[in-house]
Image (cartoon, rainbow, N blue to C red):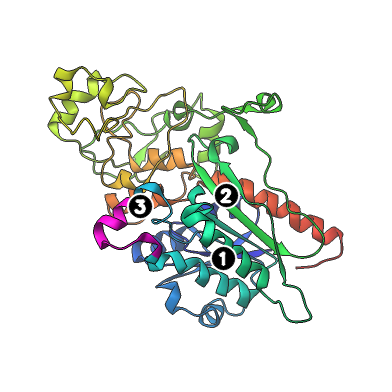
Amino acid sequence: MTNFIDLFCGAGGFSTGLEMAGFRCIGGIDNVERIVSTHALNHKFSKSICGDIRNISPEEFEKELNGQKVDIIIGGPPCPTFSTIGDAKIRSVTGKPTREDPRNELFMTYLKYVDYFRPEIFVIENVPNFITKYKGEIFKKAVEIIESIGKTDTEDGVYEVEPIEVLNAVYYGVPQTRKRMILVAHKKHGVKYHYPEQTHYFDQDDEKAKTLKHFVTVGDAIRDLPTITDNWRVSEVEYSRFDDLSEYEKLMRENNPGKTVKNNICRMSNDRAKRVFPHMAQGSKYMDLPPEVRQILPFREDIFKDRLKRLMEDQPSWTVLAHIGMDGYMYIHPTENRTLSVREAARIQSFPDDFEFVGNQQDTYVQVGNAVPPLLGRAIGNSIMKYICDIKEQGYGI
């Protein structure tokens, strides 16, 4: 079995994707106890550790892994200063330029782990702005450091960095448009790594894409999930349907053959919001409402134009963010007058139903929103598996 570790692992969306592709997660690190508990619960072979990775040396982590070989490293250093929203938020809180935020250096710690374990291949995922933020300084610095690993006066560096790609999860069967920057580097064997081929058509403008599978819709993803109300406080509930399931619903239930599924709790909406929801058509947002309806739940209309948004059954969701844990009004259920449950959000993120989230309601929403969609992770994992098979054919073992 080919082993990997997941740094900044979160709940384990990326880990789940690679395990779907046939790899084994043997370790993960994150700095929030409940998040690590979720990772440990769902990755049975993983030594999942809670702590600041800057204070956990690779040597210490190797001991925790009992010396198991690390073939692959994956991870996404936290990216609040690389996203447009995060940049403004951090400035307002700290008063300092975001380039001074210590989290900008967390990818350096990731690369220390790469230098120590020398995996065959590694993946860094982040928001697309990682490439251009600060005029590309951080991105260029990362590439320079990667290429310098193992370099001496007489030897070239160990790793080759592949051209960066930005992958949209909707092109890989996830019922959500979500773009992530993917950086892949691997040892220099003269064998190229190829990013995963798109499997689903959504909005691509080339003719080949139109021959792919149809995109997965919100309706395809959640129609069979339990019927609940926003005051429901029972996590484990029976499915609403057992037949006429979509291909996607069957996939999500594949390893959960029972009649029930967990994490079926949603945010409680206030009475004014409940009066507004019935006026919202699928795909509509706050400013589409008549003025008299908006006055029921008034917001600054020059700022919060899309403060409320109802999802569409026949389209993918827009990006599910961690902020859903604080305010779910941007994710109103397409046919019910409530916001999405944790399990519905997890389905839209492509977490299979046997994946259980640990923590209170807000904790679990945040874990879902911060994750790499497992099906996007699986697509990347499949491309890594193809690369590994190719190098083995060339006589390189791992």
Mark 2 — residue? 377
Which x, y percent locates residue 6? 53, 63
Identify the mark nearer the N-term, 2 or 3: 3
Q: Is residue 91 magenta?
A: yes
Looking at the picture, which amino acid does disc 2 mark? Gly
Q: Earlier in the sequence, mark 1 or mark 3?
A: 3
Answer left or right for 159 relative to 10: right
Per the rendering, the mark at residue 141 is 1
- Between the residue at mark 1 and the residue at mark 3, the CA separation in whole angstroms equals 21 Å
What residue is at 78 percent from the left and 78 percent from the top?
Answer: 155
Most common secondary structure along the magenta stretch:
helix
What label does residue 208 carry, if any?
Answer: none
The Cα–Cα distance between marks 2 and 1, rounded to whole angstroms, is 25 Å
Q: Where does label 3 land, which residue?
A: 86
Q: Is residue 329 magenta?
A: no
Looking at this view, is 17 or 308 the one in front? 308
Seen from this angle, which residue lies furthest right?
394
**Residue drawn where x is 80% and y is 57% of the image:** 191
Q: Mark 2 or mark 3, which is nearer to you?
A: 3
- x and y percent of residue 41 in the render? 44, 60
Callout 1 touching callout 3 (CB < 8 Å): no
